[in-house]
Image (cartoon, rainbow, N blue to C red):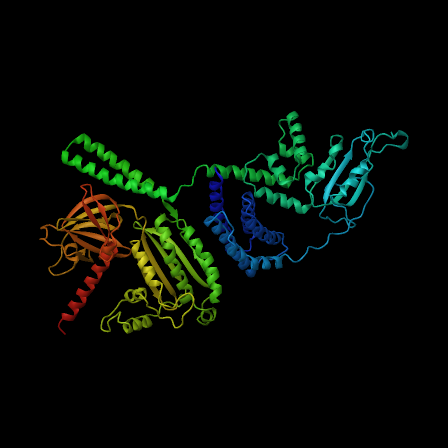
Amino acid sequence: MNIDQALHTFIAESRELLADMEAALLAVEQTDERGELLNAIFRAAHTIKGSAGLFNLEHIVAFTHVVESVLDRVRAGKLSIDDTLVALLLRCRDHVSALIDALDADPTKVDEAVLAQGAPLLAELRDYLGTTPAAALPVQTTIGSPVDPVTRITPDGASTNHWHISLRFGPNVLKDGLDPLSFIRYLETIGHVAGAAILTDTLPAAADMDPETCYLGFELAFSSQADKATIESVFEFVRADCKLRILPPHSLVSEYVDLISQQDNPARLGEMLVSCGTLTKKELDNAIQIQTTSPDKLIGNILVDEGSVRPEVVDAALAKQKQVRESSAQESRSIRVDADKLDQLINLVGELIIAGANVNQIAHRARFTELQESTSKLTMLVEEVRDSALQLRMVRIGATFSRFQRVVHDVSRELGKDINLVIQGEDTELDKTVVEKIGDPLMHLVRNAMDHGIESAEQRAASGKPVRGTLELNAFHDSGSIVITVKDDGGGLKRDRILAKARERGLADHDHALSDSEVYSLIFEPGFSTAEQVTNLSGRGVGLDVVKRNITALRGTVELSSAAGVGTTVTVRLPLTLAIIDGFLVEAARSVFAIPLDMIEECIAYSAEPGHNYTNLRGEVLPFIRLRDTLRLHGTSARSQNIVVLKHGDQRAGLVVDRLLGEFQTVIKPLDAMFANVKCISGSTILGSGEVALILDVPALVQRAIQSERKQGQLERALEPA
């Protein structure tokens, strides 16, 4: 991998880490069990800082280092995390994201304007770092019997934050011309010997003493910022002829555990311990040498027995090693693929389907049995390839939903409201193209619900509601479509005000009765607004009409339901994919049309009373429209017609056609802009013969059939004798 590819990977992974960091920051306020969330936030900042250092991105390293320092104090319990600190960390996260975006735009230079935006954030962060930790307890020197190697020597026996050095010189140290005390004096050059216990347990009786033999040992409390390897190097010349154990301070033990948890390299146990600083290379070599003579002993047990590493650090390393192995096994089953390559694959599959349909048609015309069998098998394989290719582009909608956690967090504070976001159905999958295009419409709906839907805390308390409002996002599959609902428990829509405003603007007739759904749908008209005051979020009459237009462009629909004092639900229904669907071909006036198969409930023979636009379907009234009349197709009707029963959501309607032609794999081709205003048509497809067939807009047809039946009912009631 070259440096450009590596940098691209760093940018992509940093954005993922920042998304995880944002999710953890938003969740940390909602739970009392914050330990794992705080670790996740810290790991994200630490990983970005470390990776940025590999590319010499000092401006990113410098900023994230200060963020990391604050987070470290939070994890250590020296700072409490509250709403103010969460808001600051979220802004810091946004600044790091801006630095990453600037790097992506131009890796050759630092964007000074973006960099300058971090200065006030650094000032706020340093306010949190302004306090200094309390001074350590004073330590006195003691001389006497051996002490427990993990004991810190203090006047009251309390544990202090020092390195513990357990040192026993070999008997030949003096003979080799070395002074044991010189090593202790040298320690003072890299730190401070805060306490010492001189061990005399091996000292023989005076008559048996050899003046050239060393009998002394030391237990030292050592205060230093040096790492373990540096401390060990002090005893380099005497290392082979002494027993040396260096145990870290209690604070460093937890730090070692954290460092181990942040490692991504599936290294061996000893290598992991060396890399985090809890073990030196010489200690590892010594343990490996012991293992060669006792191959049944595990390296971790040897290190603990030798006193080189604390058991909890070994346990953390073993746990991380297992986690990395499992993660590596999982990652090996997936690869990153550019979206453009997937789009190209879908296009090729679409062309393959069209070519396959052509071959199949030729085989049937030729009446060649073997060729028909081969094309039938080919069609089955193409269907499997189609399904597999479309599945590659299916992504979870949870990534889109999670964006709104931050939106609700920020906007609710801007409005002075307490709003809780509840997300359901985040595992629901749909086409990546649909996910990318639905984000902005959902953003409008969420902001509108917070601004106009949910009342202030005072209003909610006065009406007996919980002070905290609730906004729900949900997604689920239904009849080959994906349904997304945005629901709030606010005051609901004011039907009379909407209707009065619509009549004032000429959008509704004073003499025409409208259903609730028809009244509520008026708020999607361009420029329509009943807001009493304009805010930064809404009230300008711009937004909901754009929402409807964008959803309609995705071949979707949007509906509203509301109850006064209870809340409002916006239901968005979208196709699962915009590329290839299972279709059903019908004919009217010798023109062929395609209908999405998932929206067809059944097909029945045509039957209806003369002059009526509804039929009796097993005791239920089924309104219908004639495709020939709706699209103004010329020609005589077929003697035997059929009704295709269409279903959209909870509504059903019939479509009268001349002939049923059967199922067909439909490759959706968009219509040109000049056909954008054509009603009841949503796209086109190419048949096996090479002819073009139009794809019918089922939601529009169902709505037209219901309206037609309602108008006829009103007319019949008006003509009834008094």
Asked if residue 254 can be seen in this view, the reply is yes
Quadrant location of the C terminus?
bottom left
Q: Name the side, left or right, on which 212 lies relative to 680.
A: right
Q: Quadrant of residue 465?
A: bottom left
Q: Name the side, left or right, on which 347 lies relative to 130.
A: left
Image position, residue 343 (x, y; %): 34, 44
Image position, residue 628 (x, y; %): 14, 55
Q: Would you place residue 303 above or below residue 562 in this image?
A: above
Q: Would you place residue 425 above or below residue 326 in this image?
A: below
- Identify which residue, 176 or 615, lies in the foreground: 176
Asked if residue 25 can be seen in this view, the reply is no
Q: Residue at x 24, y 52 (%)?
A: 672
Q: Residue at x 47, y 49 (%)?
A: 106
Q: Residue furthest top?
A: 293
Image position, residue 30 (x, y; %): 52, 57
Instruction: State the count of labels.
Output: 0
Q: Quadrant of residue 291?
A: top right
- Identify which residue, 146 or 343, lies in the foreground: 343
Q: Residue furthest front?
A: 108
Q: Would you place residue 249 above or below residue 203 in this image?
A: below
